[in-house]
Image (cartoon, rainbow, N blue to C red):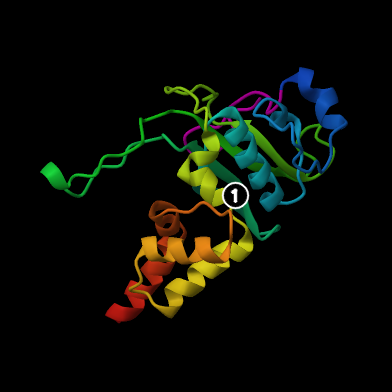
Amino acid sequence: MGEFSDDGSFATGDLLDDTAEDSYATTSNSAPTPAETMQTIEYKVWSSLDEAEKALKKAAERSGFAVSRIRSANWSPTLGFRTRVAYGCYKGKKRPSGSKGLRACKSAREDCPWQGALVYYTGDRKPYIREPGWRFSYVKNQKEHTHPMSAHASSIPANRRNNLSEDVVRDIKALFNKNPEKKASEIAYDISKKHRGVDLDRKVVNNILMNERVRYRSGSSS
């Protein structure tokens, strides 16, 4: 598969191995299937980023880990959107804690180097890429993890959040907007009562409400 340089551009050489030509020529707009894995996802093509991202996240979960967006790049004035979205492992680069001593937060991250990207092609970059669509490729060939794969990947907070329905996410945000001071644990409890079978805890709720809280604080301070 192709690789990316540090600035987000492609490294020299073909994006795809020549041996992948037949696979790409016969695959088009494939929706996620129950058997999707990190191995099969390399040979898929999606018409939308949403479909591609959902397939990538499910493939990662089936493989025992979770992914999250790192950055978007390569704005296309013609297409009107960024054509490259990079993803990292949920145990990726550690972020320094703002607290010290007993207040320091313990991070689940382990500086795992795994990185991948969804890239949109217009169909004319290589002879064997005949149609426009989103394709997955590893960044700088970072395919390996520095930690064991989880036997219960569906319990990873990022995957639990990914698996929530739009109705549940909407209700979580609605409860917060109704009462911004409401604790995440209380929101999780209320949602669990309304949506039977939904497994929530305060961490998942806090992750969903991250942007909502930023907007609320910005509005309160203005």
For image coordinates 78% across by 32% down, the residue present is 126
- State left or right for residue 26 relative to residue 62: right
Mark 1 residue type: Asn
Q: Left of 57 or right of it: where is 105?
A: left
Region in magenta: 1-16
Neighbour class for label 1 at 10 Å: few (<14), some, many (≥20)?
some
Q: Quadrant of the C terminus?
A: bottom left
Q: Position of residue 79 (x, y in %)?
A: 70, 57
| Residue 155 drawn at (x, y percent) | 50, 40
Question: What residue does disc 1 label?
Answer: 163
Q: Quadrant of the N terminus?
A: top right
Return the residue nearer the eye: 75 or 45. Answer: 45
Residue in the foreground of this view, choosing between 104 and 221: 104
Query: Is residue 15 among the parts visible in the rendering?
Result: yes
Q: In the image, residue 105 lies at what x, y percent?
A: 24, 44
In the picture provided, is 183 more to the left or to the right than 27? left
